Image: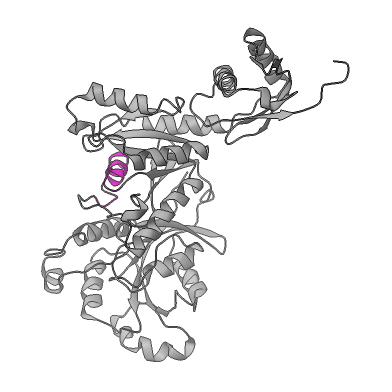
Amino acid sequence: MPKLPHIVLVGRPNVGKSTLFNRLIRSKRAITHDQPGITRDSLEGTVRHEGRCFGLVDTGGIMLNAHAALLDGPTGIRGFESHILAQTEAAAREAAAIAFVADGRAGLLPLDEHLLAHIRRLGVPILLLVNKVDGPELEDTLTAEFHALGLPLLAVSGEHGHNVRLAADMLVEMLPPAHEKEIREHSLRLALLGRPNVGKSSLINALCGQERMIVSEQAGTTRDSVDVRVEKKGTVYTFVDTAGIRRRSRIVDAVESFSVNSAIKTTTKAQITLLLLDAPEGLTQQDKRLLDLLHARKTPFLVLVNKMDRVQEQSAVKRAFKQALDFCPHIPLLFISALEKRGLEKILPLALQIHAECDIRVSTGLLNRAVREVIDKHQPPVVKRVRAKFFYLTQAESNPPTFVFFVNDAERVPESYARYLEKSLRRLFGIAHAPMRIRFRSAHKKKGE
């Protein structure tokens, strides 16, 4: 399938790129806040407008050293900003167009001019969006000085929606001609979950084969749930890098609190969750809570123990993690090093396998013939002097596979026998790693029995 054309939002911090991004994709994907510099990694979303479909990239706010930008490009940049600029340039070079966002209330600043001069060197078509113009009566006043830049210009308000639809019209006009099969792709969405600094962004970079995420020893670098798309062997994988999850007692920043809630919510929207653990630190209480949460919610997931390159006694570490996950033996457990790119080759095939297993459906006839042999081989135990009698079995739903046993008295089926039945169903129907629900429903005896 041809890849969707992309348009990139570029601008200095706090001009409202994320608010515009959310408006255009019609979803509150990017965190918006008055604090500048909230968006660090590039976010990707999809805009559907007037029969066209295109990718939209929200980049981090860029603070260029003005003189360096004019002379030598992005030198002398602080902290994360060199990474942000590198990501922005990489996205812009592959884009169909750039939407340069400025702040109409603040006016045209030297930083806008220096950044625009730097972006113009890439040779990509540019549309200037003057944001925070909340109505037509303000357009002439707030856009006057921006006309000197000599670019196609539109006054918009991401917060109030003024001219956002017209902006989408203008962006569509900047796209290349549409491909016949532009919209549908064979894809899989994977959410990465884990504590801060466990290596989620490093893993995405390693799987993509390029620096798509900012990596730092400073915990909490990722704040948004960040989408990164990559195509491998005909499948488009969308990795969603979430904010690191720490104990609530340690969350003091309002933006971080929003990020953690968003991270948990993201797992419900992804098809597969990759839970990353830290090999040197071992399994923490917070890791156990996340494991319990994913297992209880029947979330399709696999566990990746990262940073194995930093571990001396590898066999002891592997044994400890395997013992800790005894309560959910169907969950795949992989030991990896994102830094050294070791052990990564099984991740995507396993994710595809789990996704396929979640969609398995078994006919009622086949289910009952197979399970009758299982029950005959190992009868349910006697509970309160009576043995549970099984009438029939049906699959109620898939994703995850959910099986309902109709019995004379559901309370007489002990947990140990329920585990035996689940294990048998997994073996009989090839459901090795997907979550599974087993339910027992009391029913009257069939007539004639």
Residue 389 versus residue 182: which sits nearer the camera? 389
Q: In the rendered structure, which segment of residues is drawn in magenta?
A: 196-215
Residue that sits furthest to the top in the current view: 377
Residue 64 locus on image (x, y percent): 19, 69
Q: Is residue 240 magenta?
A: no
Name which quarter of the figure residue 444 lies in: top right
Locate residue 380: give its quadrant.
top right
Q: Residue 11, relative to residue 56: is it above or below?
A: below
Compare residues 290 and 86 and report the one nearer the observer.
290
Q: Is residue 239 left or right of residue 68?
A: right
Residue 274 in view (yes/no): no
Residue found 24% across the figure and 23% down from its top? 316
Q: Position of residue 104 (x, y in %)?
A: 35, 83
Front residue of 80 and 234: 80
Residue 400 located left or right of residue 321: right
Residue 158 visible in the shown view: yes
Q: Position of residue 284 (x, y in %)?
A: 31, 39
113 above or below 240? below
Q: Is residue 292 left or right of residue 180?
A: left
**The C terminus - image quarter:** top right
Tell me: residue 182, above or below residue 109.
Answer: above
Q: Residue furthest front?
A: 384
Q: Tell me which residue sits at (43%, 89%) in the image.
A: 138
Q: Residue at x 37, y 69 (%)?
A: 33
Left/right placement of residue 320 relative to residue 133 reads: left
Using the image, determine if residue 25 lies above or below residue 386.
Answer: below
Q: Quadrant of residue 386?
A: top right
